[in-house]
Image: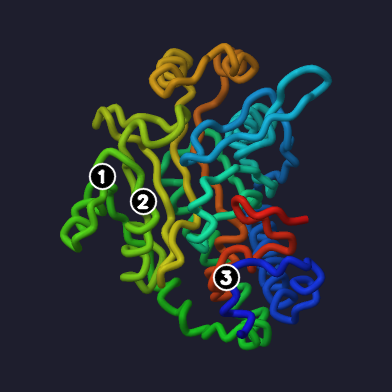
Amino acid sequence: MSEAEVTIPPTDPGVHLNSARTRSVLRVQQQLLGAAREYLREAGFTELLPPVIGPVTDPGARGAKQVDIDFYGHRYKLMTSAILYKQASLLAFDKIFCIAPNVRLEPLETAHTSRHLAEFHQLDVEVAGASREEVMELLERLVVHMVNRTVTGLPGELERLGRDPDAFRPLSTGPFRRVTHAEAVRELRDLGHGQSPDAELDWEGEAILSAKSDRPFLVTDYPKGSRGFYDREDPAAPGVLRNFDLIAPQGYGELCSGSERTNDYAEIVTRMRETGENPRKYRWYLDLVREGLPGSAGFGIGVERLTRYVAGLDAVWQASAYPKLPGVVSP
């Protein structure tokens, strides 16, 4: 069996780390991250190092459980995303980014989606005063820059991975296509897939739409209740959030989620209660909101997922030096 056909990580991490294929993949990943830092620094962004533990974390992770730790007698969480700290960091700088690990105990069935890891890294970007449309355009430019830098900078590595550079030609042919969540649901139902109009696109539906496209596209306007309390509700369309996902082509699925954030104290508390969250747990965050946290918009790109797409990998675990599949005990 070739390495490309392996669907779970080797039990011996030395086998994975000694693989020429793994070395090529990690070089691709390094090139992607170097290009992101280059682009964002030139655009005036400041890189911050967010915490990996805190009293609360992002509650909006799709069905994944959080990890509790004992912090000197207090129950803390490992970060499922940097969203709360990204917003808080805008008190120091108007444009920030970070690359940080996240831990989500994903449902066991996700071990076989080829797209989920229990530990992964995210490239997070947040801009004070920005609209959703402005950060979607920023995301397009950033992804095109990262991919183009990798295709032109590492042709030998892509050839060793069997990835055809022509697969990325459609990437730079103009703005990414936008479809609303409602339009995506209709398209899936027309194709015979029973997608719920009130929920996130499920993994199968996402893969169906992804496989039909030859370039990334954006799904916007997810229904309220499908995402975290921080996504702003559209005042012109109650029940619809001003958010988006970036979907990779060729069946690789979601790469990124983002939104315009709400910074209205009363709205945030109401949304927390609507989603079953206790506002008292978020005291430090709500205190900042009450004192004047800036409105913002931003996004988070899954580093291993983007690496998988660019390197043309069968599974996302192949884009991690130390992969943690849901439910699989590993070093």
Q: Is residue 95 above or below residue 330?
A: above
Position in image of residue 326 (x %, y %): 59, 51
Task: Name the image quarter holding residue 316.
Answer: bottom right
Q: Depth check: 96 or 11 in front? A: 11
Name the side, left or right, on which 329 lies relative to 204.
right
The residue singled out by tag 2 in the image is 202
The residue singled out by tag 1 in the image is 196
Q: Is residue 67 above or below residue 11?
A: above
Instruction: Say which residue appears at 46% left-offset and 80% top-offset.
Output: 167
Position in image of residue 92 (x %, y %): 69, 30
Name the side, left or right, on which 207 lies relative to 238.
right
Q: Depth check: 311 or 259 in front? A: 311
Position in image of residue 121 (x %, y %): 65, 52
Q: Secondary structure at mark 3?
A: loop
Q: Depth check: 204 or 326 in front? A: 326
Extreme-left residue of the structure = 190
- Cα distance in 3D space between marks 1 and 3: 29 Å
For the residues bearing labels 1 and 2, Cβ distance under 8 angstroms: yes
- Cα distance in 3D space between marks 3 and 2: 21 Å
Circle 1: residue type: Ser
Binning the other alpha carbons within 10 Å of mark 2 as few (below 14), some (14 to 19) or many (20 upward) gives few
The residue singled out by tag 3 in the image is 7
Which comes sooner in the sequence, label 1 or label 2? 1
Q: Is residue 70 above or below residue 64?
A: above
Name the side, left or right, on which 68 lies relative to 187.
right
Instruction: Say which residue appears at 62% left-offset and 56% top-offset.
Output: 325
Position in image of residue 171 (x %, y %): 44, 72
Which comes sooner in the sequence, label 3 or label 2? 3
- Cα distance in 3D space between marks 1 and 2: 8 Å
Q: Depth check: 78 or 242 in front? A: 78
Callout in the foreground (1, 3): 3
